[in-house]
Image (spheres, rainbow, N blue to C red):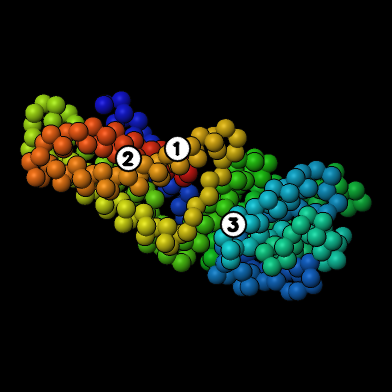
Amino acid sequence: MKKLFSILLYLVFAGTARSAAQDQAALGEVSQFALIDQKGTLVQKKDLLGKVWVANFIFTRCEGPCPVLTSRLAALQDKIPSDALMVSFSVDPEFDSPPVLDYYAKDHGAKSDRWLFLTGSPKGVSQLLANGFRLAFDAGDAENPGTTLIHSTKFVIVDANGKIRRYVDGENPEDVRKIPLAMKQLTLERDAPWAVKLPLVNAGLNFTSAVLLLLGYQLIRARKVTGHRICMGGAFLVSIIFLISYVAYHHAAGSVGYGGEGWIRKVYFAILISHSLLAALIVPLASTTLYFAMKNNFDRHKKIARWTLPIWLYVSVTGVVIYAMLYR
């Protein structure tokens, strides 16, 4: 039991640390800008206020990472929140006119209502990168920019107030896949700030339930009936509170997609599906088990408790594991 308790404690606090890192204060504020998008429309910083958006930096003549970065961003179009935006800034504005960017956008399957490609004066763009996004930039050889122009491959997540909240390594596919969840959290922070911390609260409630169940089991084996009743009643109450908190969170946030790929994705969904199916059984199982105990019908109580305890414990433990995998 001590080993399981330690594992659960680690998962909750590790998740807490990562959640705190994700919810860190602003890393800076995007400076004012006035650029032109691929349709020739003026776009200013004020036009993006109120929306969560992710920025990256590319140019159409790039012979380096730009096509890969653009493709990775394209894969996120249908995964980010419905009112969020993606904004690609050209670092070769003298060549990347709106028609050039429009062709580039269409070639990469960009949806014009969700993805802006911006260009402007070379001075304005270089100042925006240096002062607005705090990223390195070297224009290189103007005659041969494809291999000499150097720019950041970072993706920058910006909140609804125009503040930089996170830099993401665009060359790391695993980090890029976490962008939709980060943007969802910022959207939730804008629309329902009370719900932002509920995933952590829910993990804590699952952790508490697991601890109470284990303590209750040990107490009944030691024939300490009063302590056993208190622990099991407490576990039931905590689980009810969890259910209310869980429903409230998903009512505000909707579904939360998992960003992992490969074998870990299969593990995650195997745990999630089994957790969800068994969680549906817990309320009637636990209620029936407690009912027989309250009626002093201990023979029937013991028979059903043999099934209720392991299922209940599994649901509580996997609730913490799911939190750690999803918000790690």
Please report the residue visible at 66 percent of the width from the left and 48 percent of the height from the top. Answer: 154
Q: Report the front residue among 161 and 135.
A: 161
Q: Tag 2 or tag 3, which sits nearer the N-term?
A: 3
Please report the residue visible at 55 percent of the width from the left and 70 percent of the height from the top. Answer: 50
- Say if residue 153 shows up in the picture: yes
Please state which amino acid type lies under the numbered disc 2.
Ser
Badge 3 crowding class, 10 Å Cα cut-off, few under 14, some 14 to 19, many 20 or more, is: many
Please state which amino acid type lies under the numbered disc 1.
Ile
Occupied quadrant, residue 121: bottom right
Residue identifier under label 2: 316
Q: In the drawing, does residue 5 fall left or right of residue 256?
A: left
Q: Report the front residue among 169 and 321.
A: 321
Please state which amino acid type lies under the numbered disc 3.
Ile
Residue identifier under label 3: 80
Residue identifier under label 1: 271
Q: Secondary structure at mark 2?
A: helix
Badge 1 crowding class, 10 Å Cα cut-off, few under 14, some 14 to 19, many 20 or more, is: some
Q: CA distance from mark 1 to mark 3?
A: 24 Å
Occupied quadrant, residue 192: bottom left
Badge 2 crowding class, 10 Å Cα cut-off, few under 14, some 14 to 19, many 20 or more, is: many
